[in-house]
């Protein structure tokens, strides 16, 4: 039997602010974090609201020397990675191990840190930084462009930044698949642990989508709500509202976590990904491939649909995607589909694109801990055909909440499902 | 506008610039090493060059600034380029 993969640390920034406690408190109060955005960022697009961490000052968390070299998404990522490490009861010193005097030089240099890896999901990269420096280039000339532009703008910047600052020397990847990016990062991290490529993985998503250029791209792809309300599966759904932030988790094999006496949040018991192969922008209406991802993840977790206690749906609020997701859940869950509670907590604070799934996963860990399902805000009357057991507007206490399926779907039908299982030492010993 | 290109004035201006850039609380000396002592990387050296260009109204080539190992090396370049205006 495989050594279970468990989550032992979390770090999260959402539009509410820093930390899991604040996030949970706001979700339980059914409080929205979506507000009007500064006009200079959105006057050229139709969706002018978003989930922005407006009080964020990077220098409150990072030294000025570090902060000025990074785009906002990398700042979010570095801060949450540090938080996750600390939450897991570890320090950067713990990521290495003593090396024998006669060990090869490369091993001495790595000090065992090659057993620590990092997987990141992101979508946009550092466009806030890039837009500012492009303005400098065009208005003042090349010498006024920050030299840090070279390392700040691209999506993998966060992976490099965190690796350097925390001394991570093992496997690293950055995934770009729209709103499923961090789902792919999480599944790849789990695979690395299962296949023995690493002993400890940082896995996450980070996104800072509020730059004028990024907003324009999202409008062009017709993802954004014209009515400026994020209401997945509601009869008035018309697209999503963006949010910013990041969530990192620390993943390791259960035997390692137990040996070091770590607190285990939950087991990542199953995961699977599929692609629709249907269109650049549209998800396949039949939801068949999406359902296959859910079915495979349940099989990997050795769970039947009747054993899934809750689903966190991707819930883009794009009418065709919502309809396709309902189809997929019905196909995968069969007769259980109408009974399993379904929620989309991100409707309260926005869709974090490349960080959407890692934030959903973090909320799912908190839901397991509290035995409460956070609500789907703004869902008043489900759209025709959306016949699922939605947890709408207020949290729902759950007597039985042991297994949660977290779903993800990116542009053009990039599908993923992750299944969290309550950790119980007695059943896993 | 920086006008008094004496050794002491230029040295103090360089110290002030680097202290603010790297956020160090250590006392900087002429022999302080930019890489080993202050962990300045190549991009920070470029940033330093641009700031000093503005401060001293002179041109630093990339090769010049990257050849500097210590504060003294920077000081020498500045003073040599300003020899005609030294007081």
Image (cartoon, rainbow, N blue to C red):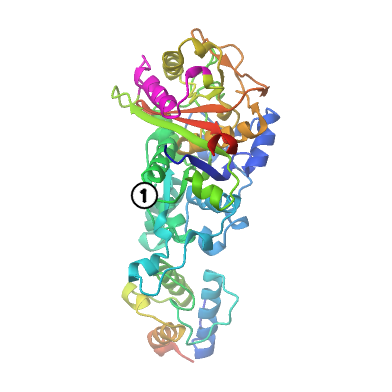
Q: Which residues are magenta?
A: A282-306
Front one among B1 and A429: A429
Q: Is residue A15 left or right of residue A157?
A: right
- Residue at point 67%, 40% (across, down): A22
A69, above or below A350, in the image: below
Measuring from the top left, give residue A132's x and y in whole percent: 45, 51
Front one among A108 and A389: A108
Q: Callout 1: residue from which chain?
A: A
Measuring from the top left, give residue A368's x and y in whole percent: 61, 32
Quadrant of the snapshot with the C terminus of chain A: top right
Front one among A269 and A211: A269
Measuring from the top left, give residue A333's x and y in whole percent: 46, 16
Magenta segment includes A285: yes
- Residue at point 61%, 14% (across, down): A380
- Residue at point 56%, 30% (across, down): A346
Looking at the magenta stretch, what is its main secondary structure?
helix
Name the residue tied to disc 1: A197
- Residue at point 39%, 42% (across, down): A194
Q: Residue lying at the far bottom in this picture: please name it.
A: B87
Front one among A348 and A394: A394
Measuring from the top left, give residue B26's x and y in whole percent: 58, 79
């Amino acid at each position: 039997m495989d050594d279970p993969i468990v989550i032992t640390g979390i770090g999260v920034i959402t539009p509410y602010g820093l930390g899991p406690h604040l996030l949970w408190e706001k979700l339980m109060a059914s409080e929205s974090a979506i507000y009007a955005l500064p006009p200079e960022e959105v006057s050229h697009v139709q969706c002018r609201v978003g989930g922005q961490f407006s009080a964020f000052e990077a220098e409150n968390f990072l030294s000025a020397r570090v902060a000025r070299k990074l785009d906002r998404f990398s700042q979010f990522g570095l801060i949450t990675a540090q938080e996750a490490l600390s939450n897991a009861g570890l320090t950067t010193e713990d990521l290495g191990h003593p090396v024998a005097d006669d060990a090869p030089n490369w091993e001495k240099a790595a000090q065992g840190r090659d057993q620590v890896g990092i997987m990141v999901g992101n979508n946009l990269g550092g466009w806030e930084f890039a837009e500012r420096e492009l303005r400098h280039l065009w208005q003042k000339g090349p010498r006024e462009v920050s030299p840090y532009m070279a390392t700040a703008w691209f999506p993998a910047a966060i992976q490099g930044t965190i690796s350097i600052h925390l001394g991570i020397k093992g496997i690293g990847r950055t995934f770009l698949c729209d709103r499923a990016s961090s789902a792919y990062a999480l599944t790849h991290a789990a695979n690395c642990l299962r296949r023995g490529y690493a002993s400890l993985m940082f896995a996450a998503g980070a996104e800072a989508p509020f730059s004028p250029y990024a907003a324009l791209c999202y409008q062009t792809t017709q993802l954004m709500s014209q009515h400026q309300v994020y209401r997945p599966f509601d009869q008035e759904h018309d697209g999503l509202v963006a949010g910013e932030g990041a969530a990192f988790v620390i993943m390791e094999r259960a035997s390692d976590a137990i040996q070091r006496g770590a607190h285990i949040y939950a087991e990542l018991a199953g995961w699977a990904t599929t692609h629709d192969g249907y269109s650049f922008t549209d998800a396949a209406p039949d939801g068949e491939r999406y359902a296959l991802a859910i079915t495979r993840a349940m099989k990997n977790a050795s769970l039947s649909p009747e054993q899934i206690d809750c689903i966190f749906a991707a819930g883009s609020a794009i009418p065709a995607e919502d309809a396709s997701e309902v189809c997929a859940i019905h196909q995968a869950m069969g007769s259980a589909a109408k009974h399993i509670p379904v929620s989309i907590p991100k409707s309260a604070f926005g869709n974090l694109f490349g960080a959407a799934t890692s934030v959903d996963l973090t909320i799912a860990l908190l839901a397991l801990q509290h035995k409460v399902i956070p609500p789907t805000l703004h869902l008043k009357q489900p759209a025709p055909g959306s016949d699922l057991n939605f947890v709408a507007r207020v949290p729902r206490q759950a007597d039985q909440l042991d297994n949660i399926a977290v779903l993800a779907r990116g542009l053009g039908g990039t599908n993923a499902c992750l299944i969290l299982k309550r950790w119980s030492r007695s059943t896993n010993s | 506008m920086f006008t008094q290109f004496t050794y002491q004035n230029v040295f103090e201006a360089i110290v002030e610039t680097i202290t603010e850039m790297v956020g160090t609380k250590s006392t900087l000396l002429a022999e302080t090493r930019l890489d080993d002592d202050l962990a300045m990387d190549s991009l920070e050296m470029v940033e330093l060059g641009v700031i000093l260009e503005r401060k001293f109204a002179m041109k630093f080539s990339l090769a010049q600034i990257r050849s500097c190992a210590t504060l003294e090396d920077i000081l020498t370049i500045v003073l040599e380029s300003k020899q005609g205006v030294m007081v």
